[in-house]
Image (cartoon, rainbow, N blue to C red):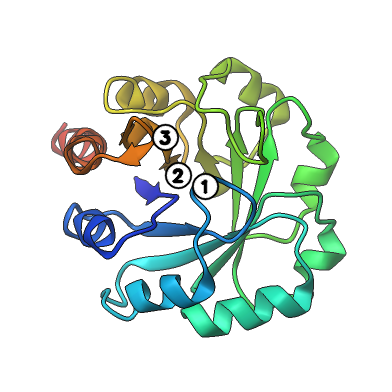
């Protein structure tokens, strides 16, 4: 089970994410209370192992700016969380994670989009991206998504992530607000979230 912890803004939190064995660490370069500058993100990524994949989250940004930021920060993946069409993604020389809101997704678009992973999230509120609320997971089945490409997001936390994995059977899960306390990344919650996710996988392997 792949795990992505998103919205990282400090080195201390990044180190906790890495030590907890997350697979992806996400930096938001779009309007958000978790937005970070490319310079500050680069200072963090330089201190991390190449084993953890660095993801940049962008919303309706230009190809040129994405390429520039990705180079400065040392990104491994680009996550497109806006209205970027398929031909836009094809212009980027990075593996793509394409995010879709569950209420705005078109099955035809999903199946034809050139990306490594499809991230399905709850509808955003003030900003693009999820609201931190859980949506009806059964609606994902109607989209007939290749589960080997599916990353589930939206209201996940340490108490419901195992149920989410059992219900949806994604290749990965993504969390941001679900590991925060009062809007700040909570190191204990990050560790517990990873424990719940990785322990479930370990148990399944023993069965």
Q: Quadrant of residue 202?
A: top left
Q: Tag on residue 191?
A: none
Residue on which the image places disc 1:
148
Residue 25 spot, x, y in % from top left: 39, 58
Residue 61 spot, x, y in % from top left: 75, 64
CB under 8 Å between discs 2 and 1: yes
Name the residue nearer the viewer: 8 or 48. 8
Residue on which the image places disc 2:
171
For marks 2 and 1 on the same chain, the one whose residue lies earlier in the sequence: 1
Which is closer to the viewer, label 3 or label 1? 3
Identify the residue at image location x=43%, y=44%: 172
Residue on which the image places disc 3:
177
CB under 8 Å between discs 3 and 1: no
- Position of residue 120 relative to residue 45, above or below, is above
For marks 3 and 1 on the same chain, the one whose residue lies earlier in the sequence: 1
Name the residue nearer the viewer: 150 or 59. 59
Q: Secondary structure at mark 2?
A: loop
Quarter of the picture holding the N terminus = top left
Name the residue nearer the viewer: 103 or 179. 179
Find the distance from the CA under tag 3 to the CA under tag 1.
Answer: 25 Å
Identify the residue at image location x=49%, y=61%: 36
Question: How crowded is the residue under tag 1: few (<14 C-alpha within 10 Å), some, or many (20+)?
Answer: few
Q: Quadrant of residue 116?
A: bottom right
Find the distance from the CA under tag 3 to the CA under tag 2.
Answer: 20 Å
């Amino acid at each position: 089970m792949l795990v992505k912890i998103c919205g990282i803004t400090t080195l201390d939190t990044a180190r906790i994410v890495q030590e907890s064995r997350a697979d992806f660490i996400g930096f938001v370069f779009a309007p958000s209370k978790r937005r970070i500058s490319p310079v500050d993100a680069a200072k963090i990524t330089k201190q991390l192992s190449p084993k953890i994949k660095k993801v940049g989250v962008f919303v309706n940004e230009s190809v040129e700016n994405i390429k520039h930021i990705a180079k400065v920060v040392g990104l491994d993946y680009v996550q497109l969380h806006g209205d970027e069409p398929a031909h836009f993604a094809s212009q980027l020389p990075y593996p793509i994670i394409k995010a879709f809101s569950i209420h705005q997704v078109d099955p035809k678009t999903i199946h034809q989009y050139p990306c490594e992973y499809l991230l399905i999230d709850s509808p955003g509120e003030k900003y693009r991206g999820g609201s931190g609320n859980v949506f009806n997971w059964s609606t994902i089945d109607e989209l007939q998504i290749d589960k080997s490409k599916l990353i589930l997001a939206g209201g996940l936390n340490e108490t419901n992530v195992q149920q989410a994995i059992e219900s949806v059977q994604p290749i990965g899960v993504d969390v941001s607000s679900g590991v925060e306390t009062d809007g700040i990344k909570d190191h204990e919650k990050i560790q517990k979230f990873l424990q719940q996710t990785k322990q479930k996988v370990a148990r399944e392997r023993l069965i």
